Image (cartoon, helix red, strand yellow):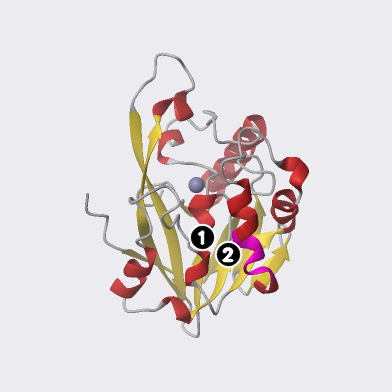
Amino acid sequence: MPLRAPIMLKIGDFTIWTLCDGYLDVDRQVFFQTKEESGKTRIPVNAFLIDRGKDLILVDTGMGKFFGPNGGELEKKIKEIGRECGEISSVLLTHLHPDHIAGIPLFKNATFFVSEKEFSYWSEEKNLNERNKKYFPFVQKIISSVKERIVQIVPEMSIFPGFKAVEAFGHTPGHVGYFLESRHEKLLFCGDLCTDMQLNCLDRPIAFDADQEQAIASRLKIFHQRDEEGFQILGAHITGFI
Ligand SMILES: [Zn+2]
């Protein structure tokens, strides 16, 4: 299936590209968690490139080939918009699931920003469990391969002028989003706070959430804030923007 072409959006002084790395065919049970549901639902896996004139910033890195042949298109997409992976100086990671970090080795000149809480969760062997055992060693390996280039952050921290991390715990213990603000325009990169399958039902948990109640509370809080303030949202598994 051909992937969506890169989509451009302007927020104040910044140019943002949605780059589709591939897609995942996910069991519908993951989203609906009832016995009546069967079959698969296709969701995109997106990363976002922000051009702020003097440098390039990326939000998440896609899934590489971790889940098979339907991913790993990010490098090609970056080339399609006339840029190179080596030009990216900073990567903001929303969390450390494989579909967000498997592309890390592509970015040899980048510093990787990750929440302190998320980093320590995946660093401690005691957190290996039935749910994450298939990818826990992979996360540890890929993170340790760039450990000298990791900067740990906390929610509400300003990362660069106009960029701020926001707490969105629940999907993973230290999951964060990133607000971008320029010339009174505001956008949230929400990571996995919400997916296509939850847009019309914000209190729907998904089986991938480490803490489903906390994930729902984070989602409702941020979407309420969106309704009050009117910012746009881009998500790794959201088609287009909302
Ligand atoms: Zn994801």
Q: x, y percentage for residue 61?
A: 48, 61
Q: Is residue 176 visible?
A: no
Q: In the current view of this chain or complex, which residue is farthest to the left? A: 2
Q: Picture quarter containing residue 207?
A: top right
Q: Main secondary structure of the magenta part?
A: helix
Q: Is residue 140 visible?
A: yes
Direction from residue 164 to residue 42 in the image, left or right: left
Report helix, strand or loop for mark 2: strand
Say which residue label 2 marks: 92
Q: Is residue 72 magenta?
A: no
Q: Which residue type does callout 1 highlight? A: Asp
- Distance of mark 2 from mark 1, alpha carbons? 6 Å
The answer to whether 69 is drawn above or below residue 172 in the figure is below
Specify the segment rendered in magenta: 142-147
Q: x, y percentage for residue 228?
A: 56, 46
Return the residue nearer the eye: 219 or 26: 26
Q: Which residue type does callout 2 highlight? A: Leu
Direction from residue 65 to residue 3 in the image, left or right: left
Disc 1 residue crowd, few under 14, some 14–19, many 20+, Cα 10 Å: many
Say which residue label 1 marks: 60
Q: x, y percentage for residue 171?
A: 60, 41
Q: Residue at x 59, y 44 (%)?
A: 222
Return the residue nearer the eye: 223 or 159: 159
Q: In the current view of this chain or complex, which residue is farthest to the top? A: 36
